[in-house]
Image (cartoon, grey):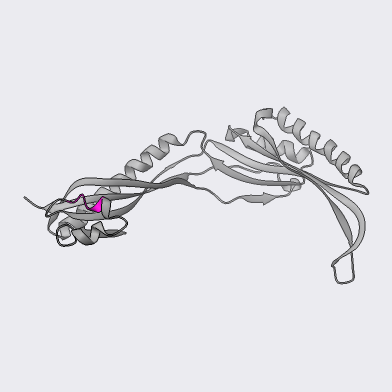
Amino acid sequence: MVRMFIAGALLALLLSSPVGAQEARLMPNETLLEVEAYGQVKAVPDQAEFSTGVTTDGRTARAAMETNAVAAHRLIEAVTSAGLPPIDQRTSNLSVRAQYRKDADGDDTSEIIGYRATNRLTLTIRNIQKATSILDALAKASATEVDGPNFSFRDDEPLKTRARQNAIAAASREADDYAGALGLRRSRVIRVSERAARSVESSDIVVTGSRVAGAPISPGQQAIGVTVWVDYTLVPKE
């Protein structure tokens, strides 16, 4: 996206606009060019996040929770034995809900027939090569569901730096294109702003515990992107 303003005749108009204070810095014969540009870099993620859990039923809320606690401890012991430290295991949801008898139409009635307890864990695997063995451990421990993977980077700052450099380079090329088409040249930068860097992540997969064992995990590549807005001044060629 490109916007241009020419100094001189439009100066009074610029001073009366919300952005006039910025654009009033133009010198005579300068044209303001506002450029939006995007830069990205791609790299192989070095960590993955999974969500897993167990769901159990009981005639009472206490019975459902007690059974669930045993199953959840079994999950925790399994992933710990597979090499995942406790610091990378986080309880993300713990709930117990009443279950109601269905009527002939399949709708809930007011009659409670039992309770269902759920305990979900978020697992951060910092060595992706261990992911398959940890998933195998979840399957053997009877995890009822596994969601993921959500790939990411332990430290994405170097990637953001490169993405910013690519974005600025793209903005400069675009500014040169417009300047050349107008018979002008790029002179100076007035302002730079950035939209927050973002990761283009792969979609999650959802599998039940019985299908987890031996699942191959491939991180592929993930992009880190940055959008910048740069205000340049264009001047006549000398």
Which corner quadrant holds the N terminus? bottom left
Q: Is residue 83 visible?
A: no
Q: In this image, 154 relative to 148: left or right?
A: left
Q: In this image, 109 relative to 75: left or right?
A: right
Q: Is residue 56 above or below residue 1?
A: above
Q: Is residue 204 above or below residue 10?
A: above
Which image quarter: residue 168?
Answer: top left
Whole-percent x and y of residue 194?
Answer: 38, 46
Q: Is residue 23 inside the magenta stretch?
A: yes
Residue furthest to the bottom in view is 105
Q: Residue at x 19, y 51 (%)?
A: 233
Whole-percent x and y of residue 178?
Answer: 20, 57
Q: In this image, 30 relative to 128: left or right?
A: left
Q: Residue at x 53, y 40 (%)?
A: 152
Give the magenta range. 22-26
Whole-percent x and y of residue 18?
Answer: 32, 57
Residue sitting nearer the eye, 219 or 201: 201
Q: In this image, 150 relative to 107: left or right?
A: left
Q: Residue at x 77, y 36 (%)?
A: 75
Q: Residue at x 20, y 60 (%)?
A: 12
Q: Is residue 28 visible?
A: yes
Picture mark count: 0
Whole-percent x and y of residue 30?
Answer: 15, 53
Q: Is residue 10 inside the magenta stretch?
A: no
Q: Main secondary structure of the magenta part?
A: loop
Residue sitting nearer the eye, 172 or 150: 172
